[in-house]
Amino acid sequence: MNEKTLHNPHLKENPFRVPEGYFEQVQARWAQKTVDEQSGRSPEVFPEKHDEGRFRRIIRLLKPQMQLAAGFVLLFGIGSLMMYITSRNQKTEAQTAEFSLMSELSYWGVDHRVVSDLILEDFPDEDNAYVLTEMDVEELIDYLNYPSLDLDEYDNYTNNE
Amino acid sequence: MNSDKELKVLCESGQYENAFALIVQEYTQRLYWHIRKMVLLHDDADDVLQNTLLKAWTGLPTFRWESQLFTWLYRIATNEVLTFLRKSKSANQMPLEERLDADPEYFNGDQLQKALQQAILRLPPKQRLVFNMRYFDEIRYQDMSRILGTSEGALKASYHLAAAKVEEILKELLL
């Protein structure tokens, strides 16, 4: 076996050294330190440290549920936002279409108010409809100004009937 | 050897100081050598070991006992080592290559062992960790995976790559 390769067992030996009694000193130092802090670590004397541990444990247990709830809230928020944006877009599109029609009419020299009035003329309001139904027959004939209609002839005709 | 079960019983009954005394007794040497091979100087290794033990002591009440105590302690020590190396590099402290000669009292390896240490020093810190843990401490890949938070496959690849590099450098140094 080549001694310059990693298979040489001598290379696995530890070449480092430590001061005499070092590990014993470390153990003694930490034994003393833990004894000094003993009262501080005991749950009866230092309850807040244990409460902290308990609090962390509770947080750890509740973490998945909290994540799930946060996920739902986030989804709901995104959904609401999408709905709001969509409805606003539809409203804007309708306004844009109306505006573009008016713009086109204005371009051709037509006032949009006139156009809307013309459209509304086809739909007489309730008051006008009432007036028409209440109108007297003679007034109606006058109104129509029927040129060849003689009222006497009309009377005769109706009496004969 | 004190099992994790015994230590867990002690901790659950609030006897942290007794549990920790057993932990120090059981693991101090292994942790020290793990640290020392990375930082090289005894004084630095001592500082890092004290920080590691302090973190283990303060973290013991919150340790969940779901993983092995040994892997938890090694993970703390590894994090402390990496933090130390990062700080010492940014503080322009003595380069690692010079550290082997700076502490002759506590390094008594022969030419071959010194060459091996010099070859290992040329590896990046994380690869050095993997190499040291596997080659010297013979830690299983499964445990290394838990300590370093890396997959076993990646660790095997990293080790074989590191070993090939070290052998190559070793041959160059010993020509």
Image (tube, coloured by chain):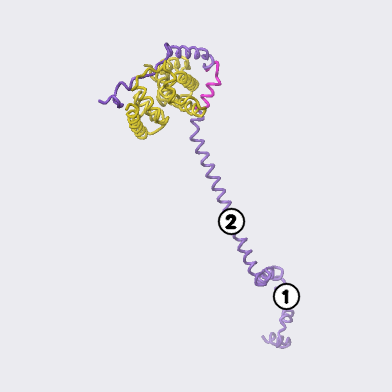
Chain colours: A purple, B yellow
Residue kind at label 1, given as amino acid type: Met
Residue A89 is tagged as 2
Quick check: B8 above or below A110? above
Q: Give me the residue at 50% from left, 37% from top.
A: A67
Q: Quadrant of the N terminus of chain A?
A: top left
Q: Residues within 10 Å of mark 2 (few under 14, many from 20)?
A: few
Q: Quadrant of residue B122?
A: top left
Q: Secondary structure at mark 2?
A: helix
Whether residue B38 is visible: yes
Q: Which of B127 and A103 lies nearest the eye of the viewer?
A: B127
Q: Give me the residue at 52% from left, 12% from top.
A: A36
Along the horizontal axis of the image, is B99 left or right of A77?
left
Along the horizontal axis of the image, is B59 left or right of B140?
right
**Residue identified by numbered label 1:** A135
Q: Quadrant of residue A49?
A: top right
Task: Quote the CA–CA distance across marks 1 and 2.
Answer: 49 Å
Quick check: A146 above or below B155? below
From the top left corner, tell me how far across and down residue B52 is, in percent: 47, 22
**Residue interval drawn in magenta:** A43-57
Q: Which of B8 and B81 lies nearest the eye of the viewer?
A: B81
Parent chain of label 2: A
Residue kind at label 2, given as amino acid type: Asn
From the top left corner, tell me how far across and down residue B169 is, in percent: 35, 30
Along the horizontal axis of the image, is B140 left or right of B54?
left
What secondary structure prevails in the magenta region?
helix
From the top left corner, tell me how far across and down residue A142 is, in percent: 74, 81
Q: Residues within 10 Å of mark 1 (few under 14, many from 20)?
A: few
Tell me if residue B32 is in the magenta stretch. Answer: no
Q: Are marks 1 and 2 on the same chain?
A: yes
Q: Quadrant of residue A16?
A: top left
Tell me if residue A49 is in the magenta stretch. Answer: yes
Whether residue B143 is visible: no
